[in-house]
Structure formats: structure tokens, C-alpha cells
């Protein structure tokens, strides 16, 4: 990747109904409970002792309720009351052990922390467990429980015989707790998911009345007999991506030392860092589909040996040791690449397009931008080759992953252009119809040979939130187990296939939590780990929604974060300038590869979460290309003089690159072509060595004295010549050229003189041929002077006379006129 060319909810009695069934009954119970609470009492609904048989979770409660919850935002984890005057105690559940029950003899322990958030001491208190209505929950019921905060009637009563005393708590004091129970004590009726709540009852301050002081909730999967149930296949996308760090600059040394924009990646690749923990977590699963950006692999490989890091404010400058710092992550990068290669062995690997270009931004804002389609196709090919080579695997490159899985017809069309036949789609974009009472399979044909693999939005969003605390991670695991077991029991004789699609920037905590949840669901024997390929081959559910949402339905929040048309045009503008530079380099491959990669990085999906960083990266790439291009330039001239009517005009070209250049010529134009004619230069085509100058000589001829404005411009040669760089203008002073009027006068005088000379010689010749008679000579009787020779046409003595037409002798005039010349 080197280049040689270098230029040196608030409290209340709210209850979310679980579905259409029982809505009015629950609303009535809620109204009664709220009324009693306002009167100073607390109503508790009796615990239901009977429940549906195994598989009753398939009762007709719309599965779409879960999707509706997801469409409002991130999936809510089970709620708890917040400290208030009425409920001063806050509880957090840090552990449910085991995470699910598989038989009546099993024991379960719920532990966590209790805190007195009020202003009065809590005394004579104890902790108890509740299991809600005592019946298995549907997916919509699970969503409703997760929305609760303060105690409500739907939480049920405390299970008798279970609990532990709680020592007095001063205001602000915290204490760990643990409550243990047998499955048989919880009176779980059948396989399914139950609410599991821990509450604190006691008194606060001087009032001895025992009341509920606080509550926290989670979910308890109960699955004692899995033999007759078909496991749900769960495919998980495991993203290995990062914001681009590698820049097109290298140091001008023999090693072509690579340069990064920052050294943040070293921390993420190190043990305990996000990418290191993410790979370790994914590697712990038996089956997972890795989604890998080849640019990250190239960057890690570049870091595995010596590398440099740009200093602030030098992004567009040529890199040198004075404006870069040594990188610190060589060992970490080497170890991480080895870890990743081991983790992906035997797994399905998806090669994302190189640099992970933002498909949605390109689809919505890239129409008509020249070269964008070609760049996207090139990214797909480069991502495939790079991933195969760096990971020593056989990756698939036919999968498109738009930002957060949001699609519309334009996004799908762009994915198809990139060569994708599978598109990963957010479940909230293609929700299950309300008339469908079960969770449908992920695969949907959406036309023109393309399949959509639609994620389960609720399950996927569990891992999009903040999971840094043990309590949050525990609740996320329990929510995942609850959702997946419920899916399995909706239609126990029909195998379901779902997709879990976490965010691209999956955190280390979320990755570890997802891996733990997947492992426990597999151990519980209601789910199997699968790949995208397996899920894509599952039967298409006829009840599934296969309609691509319209462009108008594309989420506003996702659209607001897109790369602008200006940003995309700027990235492709780099390509246009790069193409011109390539025409003159003798070693273009040293520049083409790093800049082509940088162009793709400039359009990365990762810039959605770091817009300033993306802008800085693009500006740096453009600035560096400008510095390379401007290193080949015309040397400035202010003015020059042409003495006489002809001479030579000299123009110099400087090559500031370290490699030779060719395929250039200089064109020189006169502002007044009638006053100055410029001829072909010597040499006509340029070939200049690295870091050298060359002068070009233009013969010229002037017709008048004075100043002529001259313009010199570099042009590439070949089939598609283009102007190169900025023109140079200068004044040419023409001197010592004779005035044109004088030339006219002199020319006229010469013509007169020549005419006079000719007239003179003609007179002289005529005088010699016909002299005047001598006045002193004697005259013969015929009037001729004596002693003269005969005139032309006369007969000299001794010559016979000429005969006229009448046979007589003619006079001299007639004879002269009728004389024959020639034979």
C-alpha cells in the first residue's frame, strides 16, 4: 500500500396490554388498582393457578406486538421502579442463576443490589419474589412487562414461603441481596416464559405500615421437556469493522512505512479492547457469520510492523518523521490478526465491500456522480480478495448490509449493482402483519433474484443499548432467552429461522452478552446456532411481509445521518484528479492503490457515527493529492524580453516528485497572435527525472514592439489530453523591431527607384539602336545622309532589292513594316 511518488417512564399505574385478548379485562383491573392507590391502598390481583398446556404460547396474540415495541426505539430491558416518595427503594438484578429452569426440582437464585433512595430509613423490610399472572407470556406480554416501572397489579402477588429479611437501610445506603427458591415453589404451570420480579416490602420512617417500597423485574424461561419441540435456528451477524485509520501517505523511505490518522486502533486491538473482546466472544460460539471489512484487516496488517501516526493538523501534508509519531500497536495488531484467523476457522465469513461504503448514502445522494457505480463494484471485489487473503479463508461477497438494515427500492437497487444477492434488512422495515400470530422466518424473496434476510428487530435491539453494568447485561441475557424460547413455543412443530443483527459498532460488553445469551439458549435446547446460509435456505413463510418499503418510509433519523451529496462528490472528485496524475507517472501503481483505497474509506458507513472524523479524513486525502499533483508545475515567470523580431521564449517545468514523470507537454499562447507567432517547442514532449527541472524553448517571431501577454499551460498527452495544473501568465517585452511605417516608405522608395532605373536602361538601349542624324553630314539626293548604313528593312549595298507585291521596289517605311522574321 505504499507510494513512491512523494512531495518532499415516570411513576404511575400504567399497564401495557399484552395483546388484543384480555385487553378490556386488564384495563378494568388497572383502573381498579389505580383508584385504590389514589385512596392510599394497593390492590393486588390474585395469582392465576392454571395456565395453558405446552405450546399454548401459540395462542392468537399478534407477534407483531414485539415489532411495534422495537419500532419505538431500542428494545427495553425489564423495568424497575425509580426512587420516589411512594417507592423509595431501588433494586437492580445482577444475576439470575441459573438463567432458566429445566425441571421442578431446580433451584433458582436471584441476586443484586438494593438501595434506599429516599430521605427516610427503611426498617422491618423483607424481599420477596413474584411471577406475574402465573401464566406463560407471549412476545407482546414480554414487551409490556419490559415497559413497567412502578409496581402494578400485573406483577402478581409475592410467592408464599419465599423471601429473605432485609436489614434496616439508612437513606442512601446500599446492600447486596439474594433470594432463592425452588421451581416447584414458584408454581410454574407449563413450559414458557414467566415474569420474575423481586420486591421490597417494609416501612419507611415512623409509619409502621408495611407497603411495597420498590420492585425490579426480569424474565424466567421454564423449559422442562424439549423432546417434542423443533429448535429455532438463530443466525447471528458478527461485525468486525472500525472507522478507517489508514491514510494514503507513506514515509519516503525504502520500507514505505505506513501512516495512520490516529493510534486509537492500537487500544481496541489490545487485550481488553473492543475488537479483541469482540473476536474472543465470537470465537466462543460454535456457529456465527462474521461480517468483515477488508480495510480493517489491511490496517491491522500495516500496524503489525513499524508504522507512524499523523500529528494533529498535518492530515493533508506529506508524511515525514518530523510530522508523525511512532505507532504503538505492532504487537497488538499481530496478535489480533492471529486471534481472528483462529476464530473464523470453519465459520461463514462475509466480506463487506472494502472500506464498508455507505450503501444508503450512495443510493439516496449519489445519483449522477460519475464513477460512483464503478467504485462500489471495485469495493466489492477488493473486499472479497483482501478478506480471503488476510484471513486465509473463502469468504462470500454477495451479502449487502445497509446502515442498520434500513432499505427502500433505491438501496436495494444499489446493493444489486454492487453484486449482492442477499440483503440484510431491519425487521422494523418489513414488520409482520397484525394478522399473523407467530414469528415468521427471516428469508423473504424481494424480486430480481435478491433475497432479504430480515432480522428480528426486538431480539437484535437488545444488544444495541448500553450494557456496561452487570445488571444491564443480566437483564439482556434474560430478555434474549425469553424471546427465543417464546418463538420456539409459538409453533413447536414448525422450525423457525431468525436473524440477529446487532449494530456495526458492537461494543465489547454487548458482544460478550450476546455470546453468553446464544450459548445459554443452545444449552437450553430450544435454539440452534446457524449461519446466514442456513437461514437463507429455510422455507419461505407465506405469511411473511416481502414488500420493500417505499422511499418515503425510509427512517428520518437514518436519512439525517447520511453522507451528503457534497461528500460523495468530493470523494469521487479525488478519483478524477487521481486519473490525471496517473497519466504522467512512470510508476503509477505506487500511487493508485493507496488512493483508490482512501476513496472507498472516504465513503465508509462508519462515518455516520463520526461525521467530523469523516470530514477530516476526506479533507486530508484531498489535500495530500493536491500536494502531489502540484509538485509537477510550471515555474513562475514575471516577465521576459524578446530583443529583435525573432528569438526564443523559455518556460521551465519542475518535478517535485521522487519518481520520473512523462506524457506531458507545454502549450504557450500569445494574447495577441497577430503581433507574435509562437512555434513548436523543443522538446515537444516532456520526460523529467525525479526532483529535477527542465526548460522548454519556444521559437517566436514578433511583428511590432511592445508588451504581449503570454499564457503557459501543462497538458497531458495521449488519446485523452487534459490540462494539468494551473497556468502561468507573464508579460513578454518585444524590443528593437523597426517601425512598420518606415518599412512601407522604404518599400515605396525602392519601387520608384527600380522603376527609374528600368526606364533609364530602356532609353539607353533605344538610343543605341536608333541614333539621331548628324546635322553636318552630307545629304544624298534621296535625302539620306551619306555614309550611313541602311535602316532595318532596307537593302544594303550588294543586296538585291526586295520585290513588292507589284514587282517594284518599295520605299523604306513599307519595307520595314512588312519584313519577315525567320524562315
Image: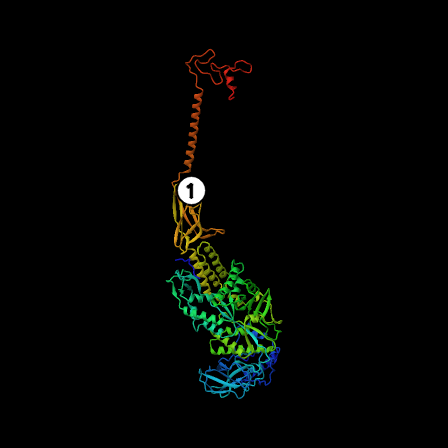
Q: Residues within 10 Å of mark 1 (few under 14, many from 20)?
A: some
Looking at the rendered structure, the number of numbered marks drawn on it comes to 1
Q: What is the x, y in percent for residue 661?
A: 43, 53
237 up-or-down from 418: above or below: below
Q: Is there any visible trace of residue 9 in the rendered image?
A: no
Residue 294: in sight, yes or no?
Answer: yes
Frontmost residue, 805 versus 274? 805
- Image position of 433 (left or right of 771): right
Q: Between 744 and 86, which is closer to the camera in this rendering?
A: 744
Q: How is the image coloured?
A: rainbow
In the current view of this chain or complex, which residue is farthest to the top? Answer: 781
Please say if 567 is above or below 654: below
The secondary structure type at the circle numbered 1 is strand
Residue 138 coordinates in the image, percent (x, y): 58, 78
> Image quadrant of residue 29?
bottom right
The residue wearing badge 1 is 701
Residue 415, how many percent across, how many down?
Answer: 55, 64
In front: 372, or 238?
238
Image quadrant where one finds the N terminus: bottom left
Would residue 68 appear left or right of 703 to someone viewing this image? Answer: right
Coordinates of residue 608 in the picture (x, y in percent): 49, 66
**Does residue 636 lie above or below 106 as drawn?**
above
Amino acid at each position: 500500500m505504499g507510494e513512491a511518488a512523494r512531495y518532499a417512564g415516570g411513576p404511575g399505574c400504567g399497564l401495557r396490554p399484552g395483546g388484543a385478548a384480555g385487553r378490556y379485562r386488564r384495563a378494568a383491573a388497572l383502573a381498579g388498582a389505580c383508584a385504590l392507590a389514589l385512596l392510599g391502598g394497593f390492590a393486588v390481583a390474585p395469582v392465576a393457578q392454571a395456565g395453558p398446556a405446552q405450546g399454548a404460547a401459540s395462542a392468537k396474540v399478534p407477534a407483531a406486538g414485539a415489532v411495534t415495541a422495537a419500532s419505538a426505539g431500542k428494545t427495553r430491558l425489564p423495568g424497575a421502579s425509580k426512587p420516589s416518595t411512594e417507592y423509595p427503594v431501588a433494586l437492580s438484578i445482577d444475576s439470575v442463576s441459573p438463567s432458566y429452569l429445566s425441571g421442578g426440582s431446580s433451584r433458582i437464585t436471584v441476586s443484586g443490589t438494593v438501595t434506599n433512595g429516599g430521605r427516610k430509613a427503611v426498617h422491618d423490610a423483607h424481599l420477596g419474589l413474584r411471577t406475574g399472572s402465573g401464566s406463560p407470556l407471549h412476545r407482546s406480554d414480554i414487551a409490556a412487562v419490559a415497559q413497567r416501572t412502578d409496581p402494578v397489579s400485573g406483577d402478581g402477588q409475592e410467592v408464599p414461603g419465599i423471601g429473605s429479611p432485609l436489614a434496616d437501610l439508612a437513606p442512601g445506603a446500599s446492600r447486596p441481596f439474594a433470594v432463592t427458591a425452588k421451581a416447584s415453589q414458584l408454581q410454574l404451570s407449563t413450559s414458557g416464559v414467566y415474569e420474575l420480579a423481586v420486591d421490597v416490602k417494609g416501612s419507611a420512617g415512623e409509619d409502621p405500615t408495611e407497603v411495597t417500597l420498590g420492585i425490579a423485574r426480569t424474565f424466567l424461561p421454564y423449559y422442562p421437556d424439549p423432546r417434542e419441540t423443533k429448535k429455532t435456528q438463530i443466525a447471528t451477524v458478527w461485525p468486525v469493522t472500525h472507522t478507517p485509520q489508514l491514510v494514503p501517505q507513506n514515509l519516503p523511505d525504502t520500507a514505505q512505512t505506513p501512516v495512520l490518522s490516529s493510534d486509537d486502533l492500537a487500544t481496541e486491538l489490545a487485550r481488553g479492547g473492543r475488537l479483541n473482546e469482540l473476536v474472543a466472544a465470537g470465537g466462543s460460539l460454535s456457529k456465527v457469520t462474521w461480517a468483515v471489512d477488508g480495510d480493517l484487516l489491511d490496517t491491522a496488517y500495516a500496524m503489525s510492523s513499524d508504522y507512524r501516526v499523523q500529528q494533529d493538523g498535518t492530515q493533508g501534508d506529506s508524511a515525514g518523521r518530523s510530522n508523525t509519531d511512532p505507532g504503538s500497536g505492532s504487537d497488538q495488531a499481530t496478535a489480533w490478526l492471529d486471534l481472528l484467523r483462529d476464530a473464523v476457522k470453519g465459520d461463514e465469513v462475509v466480506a463487506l465491500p472494502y472500506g464498508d461504503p455507505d450503501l444508503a448514502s450512495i443510493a439516496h445522494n449519489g445519483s449522477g456522480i460519475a464513477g460512483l457505480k464503478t467504485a462500489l463494484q471495485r469495493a466489492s471485489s477488493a473486499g472479497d480478495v483482501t478478506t480471503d487473503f488476510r484471513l486465509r479463508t473463502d469468504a462470500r461477497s454477495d451479502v449487502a448490509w445497509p446502515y442498520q438494515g434500513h432499505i427502500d427500492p433505491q438501496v436495494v437497487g444499489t446493493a444489486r449493482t454492487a453484486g449482492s444477492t442477499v440483503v440484510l434488512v431491519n425487521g422494523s422495515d418489513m414488520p409482520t402483519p397484525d394478522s399473523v400470530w407467530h414469528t415468521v422466518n427471516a428469508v423473504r424473496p424481494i424480486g430480481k433474484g435478491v433475497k432479504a434476510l430480515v432480522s428480528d428487530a426486538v431480539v437484535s435491539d437488545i444488544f444495541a443499548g448500553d450494557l456496561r453494568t452487570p445488571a444491564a447485561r443480566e437483564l439482556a441475557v434474560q430478555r434474549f432467552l425469553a424471546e427465543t424460547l417464546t418463538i420456539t413455543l409459538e409453533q413447536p412443530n414448525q422450525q423457525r429461522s431468525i436473524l440477529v443483527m446487532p449494530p456495526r459498532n458492537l461494543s465489547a460488553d454487548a458482544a460478550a452478552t450476546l455470546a453468553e445469551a446464544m450459548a445459554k439458549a443452545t444449552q437450553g435446547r430450544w435454539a440452534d446456532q446457524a449461519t446466514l446460509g442456513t437461514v437463507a435456505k429455510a422455507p419461505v413463510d407465506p405469511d411473511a411481509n416481502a414488500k420493500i418499503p417505499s422511499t418515503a418510509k425510509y427512517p428520518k433519523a437514518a436519512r439525517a445521518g447520511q453522507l451528503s451529496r457534497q461528500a460523495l462528490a468530493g470523494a469521487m472528485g479525488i478519483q478524477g484528479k487521481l486519473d490525471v496524475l496517473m497519466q504522467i507517472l512512470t510508476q503509477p501503481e505506487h500511487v493508485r492503490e493507496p488512493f483508490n483505497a482512501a476513496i472507498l474509506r472516504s465513503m465508509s458507513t462508519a462515518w455516520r457515527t463520526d461525521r467530523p472524523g469523516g470530514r477530516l479524513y476526506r479533507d486530508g486525502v484531498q489535500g495530500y493529492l493536491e500536494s502531489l499533483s502540484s509538485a509537477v508545475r510550471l515555474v513562475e515567470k514575471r516577465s521576459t524580453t524578446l530583443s529583435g523580431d525573432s528569438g526564443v521564449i523559455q518556460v521551465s517545468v519542475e518535478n517535485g516528485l521522487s519518481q520520473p514523470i512523462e506524457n506531458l507537454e507545454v502549450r504557450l499562447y500569445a494574447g495577441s497572435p497577430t503581433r507574435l507567432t509562437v512555434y513548436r517547442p523543443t522538446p515537444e514532449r516532456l520526460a523529467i527525472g525525479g526532483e529535477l527541472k527542465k526548460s522548454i524553448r519556444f521559437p517566436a517571431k514578433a511583428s511590432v514592439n511592445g508588451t504581449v501577454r503570454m499564457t503557459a499551460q501543462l497538458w497531458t498527452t495521449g488519446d485523452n489530453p487534459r490540462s494539468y495544473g494551473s497556468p502561468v501568465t507573464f508579460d513578454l517585452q518585444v524590443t528593437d523591431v523597426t517601425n512598420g511605417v518606415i518599412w512601407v516608405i522604404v518599400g515605396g522608395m525602392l519601387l520608384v527607384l527600380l522603376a527609374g532605373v528600368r526606364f533609364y536602361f530602356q532609353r539607353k538601349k533605344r538610343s543605341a539602336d536608333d541614333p539621331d542624324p548628324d546635322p553636318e553630314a552630307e545629304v544624298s539626293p534621296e535625302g539620306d545622309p551619306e555614309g550611313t548604313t541602311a535602316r532595318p528593312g532596307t537593302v544594303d549595298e550588294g543586296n538585291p532589292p526586295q520585290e513588292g507585291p507589284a514587282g517594284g521596289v518599295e520605299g523604306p517605311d513599307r519595307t520595314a513594316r512588312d519584313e519577315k522574321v525567320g524562315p
